[in-house]
Amino acid sequence: MNLAFDLLVGLSLVWVAWRIVGSRDHFQAVVLFITFGLILSLAWTRLQSPDIAIAEAAVGAGLAGVLFMDALGGLSSSPGSPRPAVPLTLLFPCLILASIMAIAVLFVPEDFLGLIPVVHGALTDTSLEYPVTAVLLDFRAYDTWLELGVLLVAVLGVMGIRRIGSISGSRLPAPADPVGRWIIRILLPIMVLIGGYLLWLGAFAPGGAFQGGVVLAAAGVMLWQAGHPSLGLLPRLWWIVLLFCGFLSFLILAFWSLFHSGRMLAHPENKLWILGVEYAATISIATCLISLVLASPGRCRVRDN
Amino acid sequence: MTINELLSVLFCLSGGVFFLAGTAGLIRFPDTYSRLHALTKADNLGLGFIVLGLIFVAGSLPETIKLVLIWPLAMIGSSSACYFIANHVHRLTRNKGITRD
């Protein structure tokens, strides 16, 4: 029964991906992409990785979907455009890659536990209780640090392309009607609460900086969709501080530990450090994602000089 | 199988029936309004039944509270999304004088 369900999920992933590639209509492709993200998060749930499932549903399906929809607004609609040709030359390398991965899966021993024993064994060395958060913030802090850097570069790239220095001047969507305002009044406090809850939960259960940050970002995007400037209200200096605080906190931690213990990013025993870094990362992630949507060229093209 | 598990299976199955009905409506109904009707009515009821079913096998009180919270949140989301889509379609048809499916 479980196998049948897993097969269904896997096959629908491939089918939806194929539909996205072959889709004639941009709007349809975007909707299918969101569907793809939701099925993918279902697949991660089946693989018992709730952390990735939450992140995939929130980022892959949610915020990426908003960005794509927004970009659609800036594209000239061309319903009769010809079917995009899928280059057949790509098919061959893809098939080779897929078969190599399939063979690799076949050679995994059945009682293989991966890195689980290693991570659980090393948990005593860190002040974190939840293995996934320990990997993200302690064992592989370098990766998380650079991920924050990637988000920053993405925001800077969008700002650079649009030649704007802040998000406060971006064009707002039309103010929401009463129904929209009613929903925001209900949902906004709940979203802020859940964002904080997910962040706090990261210490001992699935959750953490990325998941919490994305929920907070969704709250900001929702406000913006209703015609409220949200982050654009902040003075430019504050906005820059929020944008960079996650990256900077990792940088400070790296330097601090370099001079104190001789190793970069070696976490001190004090839990306050980890909390500080994680909170700063959450704020930065939320700010970066909101800024990406607010500065996205699609909706604002009308205002360009 | 305990009585709780039996009730859980029963409620989840009835939830599944409503989801099936909603999906059939989404595929078979002729225009946007009736499709929205099928989706938001049947699926909300289906989700309610599934939440009800899962409460019977929930391990603790916090888990139960979180499960119960999911239902009104999903209803707020789906009813408002339904309104926005219907409103958009209504404006499109009013402006252009065409029916859009």
Image: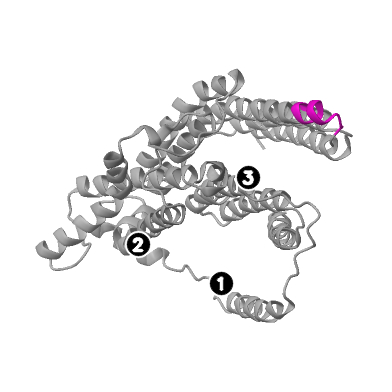
Under tag 1, what secondary structure?
loop
Q: CA distance from mark 3 to mark 1?
A: 49 Å
**Nearest to viewer (mark 3 / mark 1):** 3
Sequence-first tag of 1 and 2: 1
**Residue B96 horizontal side relative to residue A9, left or right:** right
Name the spot of residue A298 as percent of width and height, x first: 57, 47
The one of A124 and A232 positioned closer to us in this rendering:
A232
Under mark 1, the amino acid is Glu
The mark found on residue A110 in the picture is 1
Mark yes or no: residue A186 visible.
yes
The mark found on residue A146 in the picture is 2
Under tag 2, what secondary structure?
helix
B93 vs A155: above or below? above
Q: CA distance from mark 1 to mark 2?
A: 34 Å
Which residue shows up at 67% across the image and 28% down it?
B84
Tell me which chain the residue with mark 2 is part of.
A
**Residue A55 horizontal side relative to residue B86, left or right:** left
Instruction: Inspect the magenta stretch and tell me whether residue A111 lies in it.
Output: no
From the image, tell me which residue sits under label 3: A73
